[in-house]
Structure formats: structure tokens, C-alpha cells
Image: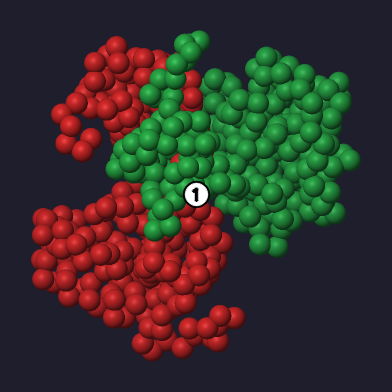
Chain colours: A red, B green
Amino acid sequence: MRGQPGRSVTSKVLALLDAFSPTSPALTLSELARRAELPLSTVYRRAAELVEWGALERGDDGRYRVGLRLWEVGSLAPRGLGLRELALPVMEDLYEVTHENVQLAVRQGLELVFIERITGRDAVPVLTRVGGRFAMHATGVGLVLLAHAPVEVQEEVLAAPLERYTDLTITDPARLRRCLADVRRVGYAVSDRQVTMDALSVAAPIRASEGVLAAISLVVAHDRADPVVLAPLVQAAGRVLSRALGSPPRQPPGWTPSPPRGGTR
Amino acid sequence: MRGQPGRSVTSKVLALLDAFSPTSPALTLSELARRAELPLSTVYRRAAELVEWGALERGDDGRYRVGLRLWEVGSLAPRGLGLRELALPVMEDLYEVTHENVQLAVRQGLELVFIERITGRDAVPVLTRVGGRFAMHATGVGLVLLAHAPVEVQEEVLAAPLERYTDLTITDPARLRRCLADVRRVGYAVSDRQVTMDALSVAAPIRASEGVLAAISLVVAHDRADPVVLAPLVQAAGRVLSRALGSPPRQPPGWTPSPPRGGTR
């Protein structure tokens, strides 16, 4: 760490955790060693300690998996389950009135992480996984998170190649910049077939006192989507959650809220 | 580890994670040092590495919190989010037909951990938190998990004092032993006002090839609960999930399933 050539023990332990991914959730000892770039003997010893504590579990097949104890500790992350517990009732309301997909995401570095998802049974299929990452420039929640990210983050995303998911994905930095300005101005984002050709999402920000903490969206089939109907629904949900997080909702143009219950603006 | 008097670096790193709990999700450096029983300088150094990786996050208030990266890795635990992703659609179905609380739990050592929860808005209030722990001998899901735990686990729970939550909590080991035998025999558990005086829960096992992996329950207001109606609903949900996990459902007495789709018993 901090430019030292040798790796600290802490970084070796964390490298073992880094070895697991959604596409490789179960690893043999040698796979673990190869991915963590550590000698087998080191991995064997450290993994035994991690199993004893419960960070890893070892199955009958001899493979290591992430353990429930790590999930328990992870569940204490305020931006993870804490936010999710707060948001879930509001997400369920959105689901009950629309029966469409409802998503909740936060920014992690230059990407977004999906914190929660309610999948409509008859709704358009979505690619997302709770705990999974995605690029910010394509999805509705991502456009909201990027629009409200620190300027350095925006510039870093705009400077890197923007992956094309469909013919409608915005890959031109100048166009993306204008799109982000629009998102900030109107108070919501629309991703129309920018991730898959069958889906449209409408997303709104969830604000905490320190800024936009998360984004909430509806993802619907493109051919039955009407952003004019969806946007106020999603914005209202975002505002309810912003208020719950202690942030007075900002007044977007053309939207007249009911009088706030308590508190002043 | 393994009887060595000194603590390994791995165990020190894990002690820092252990310091966080649902009642203390944000800790100062000195609180972290006291809880982990480590010198301040050690904690400062290790915590900086954990922050750099994302296992911890440090807020404007200087306090450390569990970081989103740890939640991401924890979300790869097969008994955590993996199970939850599988179970959620079935839990949502249970919720849609009952509008009561639906819970999903697994055993961790001598306790249970709640993996998921759908809370009915107009349903009886429940004490549980996703990621939170509870004793097994009182709740419906706990009775199911305990009834199907290894004999050593059952004996250890039966040998320890059984906490009384209400006048109806089973605290007599001999009675609990009979209750667990009943749960195995009928294929579901009923906890009638054994956690709070207003609630009744009915729970059923979710089986994987290696045995009972989890339990699912409905928690309803005691005065409108009818276990005769609820038990088949919960059992059916448990069987759907058992089948999805690759375990042929066991035939409980008096229950005639529709012919299994593929596979033999």
C-alpha cells in the first residue's frame, strides 16, 4: 500500500475476497491462489482463517465460497442494506401501481451498483443483479448518478471510451454532457433503448444532506412506455426517500408538490 | 488461531470488521480500537487499507462505517443474496395472496439470520431486520431450522438457557424437544405468540441436496391467524424452492402434490 513494493497482509486477505465475482462465486484453492496472485501455502493458511471466521465457506466439493458472516457484516453498510430497508416500501408501492421493474442504485467509483430490484413477472426482462455493477452512461439510474457525481468523476467517465450497448447508447462525450445537463435541469433521466432495444427506464435522484446518494427507476417495455406518466411517479418516489433521508426536496420545474409535512425548505 | 497465543494479522483485520454491529454501525477510530482490542496505531494503519479497498468508508464526521465494496462481496454468498434472489419471486407471490409478512432465514451456528423479509403494510409489526440474528427456539423459521439442524446443534441449544420472550415461549428443553419432533413429523412449524403476544408465524423448510438449507414463513396477527389455511401455503412455497434447489420435495402426510415436473423421487 502507499507505493510500498511488498504487499501487506491486509491486502493479501482482501485479494482473496476480490477473487470472487458473480461469474466465479465458487473457487478451488488453486483458482483462489491464481486469482489472488499468491502462493498456494499462503492462500491455504489465510483461507483457513477466513473460513474459521465465516468470511468464506468451504463446500463438500472442496470449493470456497463467500460466507454468510461476510454477508452479515456487509449488510451493515449504510449505502447497502440500510438504504435498501428505507427504500423498499416505496419501491413496493411503485411496483404495486405499475407492476413494472423497480430499481435502486448507488454510485461506486466510475460505475453504479444495484442495491435493490423488484422484478415485475410480466415486465420486460432486465439484465441487472442486486450487488452487480453497470456502466453509468447507459441506464436511467446511471445517468442520474453521473449527472450528480462530482465533476472529476464526470470528466473521467467522459474521457474514457463509452461502451455501446445498442445503436441508441450515447457514446459521444459532447452529447452525453448535454444529456447530463438535461437530467439536472428536468430532475429525471430517460434511457430509451440505450441498454437493450426492448426497454426504457425513467430514473430520479434520491438526495441526502451531502448530495445525491442514490437513484430509483422504473424499467418498462419500450413499446408501452410513456415517460410523461412514469416520470412524476418516479420523481415522487425519489422525493419521499429524499425527505426520509433528511434532505428537503428540490422543486423541479412544472411540478407542484403537496405542502411538506413539517420542516421548512 | 489454532491455539497460538499471538493474533495473526488476518484475525486483526477480521476483528475490525467484527467491531461493527446493527446497534453500532458507525465507529470512531478509538471505538474501533477498543472493540477490536488493538492499539490505535495498528487500527489506524489497517483501517486505512480497508478504506482504500472499500471494506470501510469514512464519513465527514470522521467515523468509520462498513463500505459498499464489502456489501458487494458479501452479496456473492450463496446462502445470502443467492438464496434470496431465488426465493424473492416466491415470497412476492406469498405476499400478493396474503398481504402478510413473509420471512426467509438460514441457520448460522446456534442462531438464525434473516435473509429477506417482505413486510405487509397493514400486517402485524415484526421485529426482524434483514441481516439480523435471532434465537431459533422461539420463531417459526427458527423452529424449522432447529428441528432439521445437526443433532449436536440441537443438543447445544437445548442445553443452554432458552430465553423467554413471552409467557408462551417454550423454555422447557423437554417440551422444545417434543415440539421439534412435531415439526419434523408434520412438515411445518407454528410459533403462536412465542415471540410477541400479537403475532403467529407458520414456517416450512427449504431443502437442498445436503439437507434443510433455509426456512420460509408467514407472520400474521394472532387474532386473524388460521394455521390450517396458512400451513399449506407456506409448505407449497417451501416445496417450490426446494425443487428449484434440486431437492425432491418430501411428501408430508395428508398432502398430495401435483406430479413432479421431470426428475424422479
Q: Residues within 10 Å of mark 1 (few under 14, many from 20)?
A: many
- Return the chain for callout 1: B
* Residue A155 pos. (x, y %): 15, 63
Q: Residue furthest right?
A: B167
Location of the N terminus of chain A by quadrant is: top left
Query: Is there any visible trace of residue B146 in the rendered image?
Result: yes
Query: Is there any visible trace of residue B206 in the rendered image?
Result: no
Looking at the rendering, which quadrant does residue A10 occupy? top left
> Could you tell whether B136 is left or right of A247 in the image?
right
Looking at the rendering, which quadrant does residue B109 occupy? top right
> Could you tell whether B259 is left or right of B233 in the image?
left
The residue at 38%/89% (across/down) is A254
Front residue of B209/A9: it is A9
The residue at 79%/29% (across/down) is B162
Report how many numbered discs are placed on residues in the image: 1
Looking at the rendering, which quadrant does residue B159 occupy? top right
Q: Is residue B161 above or below residue A87?
A: above
The residue at 41%/17% (across/down) is A48
Q: Is residue A185 above or below residue A25?
A: below
Dot 1: element = strand
Three-letter code, disc 1: Ala
* Residue A118 pos. (x, y %): 47, 56
Front residue of B169/A199: it is B169
* Residue B63 pos. (x, y %): 44, 51
> Could you tell whether B215 is left or right of A182 in the image?
right
Which residue matches tag 1? B26
Q: Is residue B168 above or below residue B196?
A: above
The residue at 27%/14% (across/down) is A40
Front residue of B233/B197: it is B197
* Residue B228 pos. (x, y %): 80, 43
